[in-house]
Image (spheres, rainbow, N blue to C red):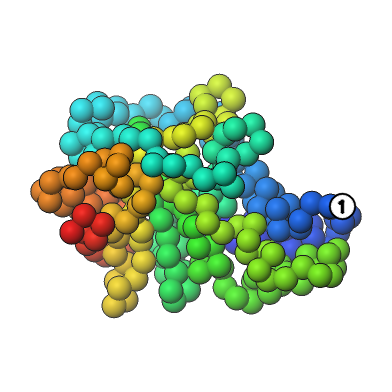
Amino acid sequence: MPLASLVRREERQAEAAPAPGNRPMSTDVAMNLQRSAGNQAVSRLVSSGPSGRAHPVQRASPAELDHTAGQAVPPKKTKDHEIDDAGDVRLNPLWVPLGEFSGRDLDNSPEGAKWQYAVTEDGEISLGSEDVASLIPRAQLDRLLAGMRTKQPGMTADDLSGGLENMGHPTIAAHFDQVTGRTTHNPKGRVSGELYRIGGVWTLNDKSGRFMAEKVRGKPQPEDLERWLSGVAQRIGRQTRRRINYQIMKHS
């Protein structure tokens, strides 16, 4: 899973690092995981350019992207805990671009796992989760918690999950500044929703209260939703080599 190596590193650091003083340990975990994911994104920007690709590619025009994945709109809202001290959107702890996602990531996801996806303003697909606990095996979370408790004995499982959970679609559709690599405030997103198993088959939908709300997107026509969702399902299916279904839920 994209987060597994980061969690293992946090386990080691929790046992070796000094206590963090007055700041909740769960906040430290969240910040470190987000910083690690952010550093990976910056490395891609530095080595491969803003697109994160090794070679330039011909991009679709904004009009073409509007047709295939919906207009790029700002989120209905970005919650306070999704904004860092500099006013930029935080990066989802499980953030991963589709190009680095694989069928193994889906296969290794526990029963009940829920991913979120977002098509970004430039037409790329990113994935993450606002329910991190559903994607990390219980035993791994327990090991991480045990390591944290060596420095903060009173820490609970709720404290740990509280620093990692509820990072929604704006943190997945994050846009990176081409010079600094930092995420920018209020990123725009196109069609977005959830990805989870239904009857053993991975299925995506259009449930995003941030980018699919009527307040920001209006009322899409059924044929538009079909085109947007089927296109995302095909792209994720090609990348993962897994069957991906889709269903219209928010606008059904």
Q: Can the viewer see residue 203?
A: yes
- Determine the residue located farthest toward the front in the rendered image: 215
Q: Position of residue 163 (x, y in %)?
A: 64, 57
Q: Nearer the viewer, residue 73 or 93?
A: 73
The residue where tag 1 is placed is 21
Which residue is depicted at the point 78% across and 65% down? Answer: 148
Left or right of 62: which side holds 92?
right
Image quarter hosting the C terminus: bottom left
Q: Residues within 10 Å of mark 1 (few under 14, many from 20)?
A: few
Establish if 218 lies above or below 104: above
Which residue is depicted at the point 43% across and 48% down? Answer: 169
Q: Can the viewer see residue 120?
A: no
Which residue is depicted at the point 26% across and 45% down? Answer: 214
- Determine the residue located farthest toward the top in the rendered image: 179
Left or right of 45: which side holds 111?
left
Establish if 25 lies above or below 89: below
Which residue is depicted at the point 63% across and 64% down? Answer: 161
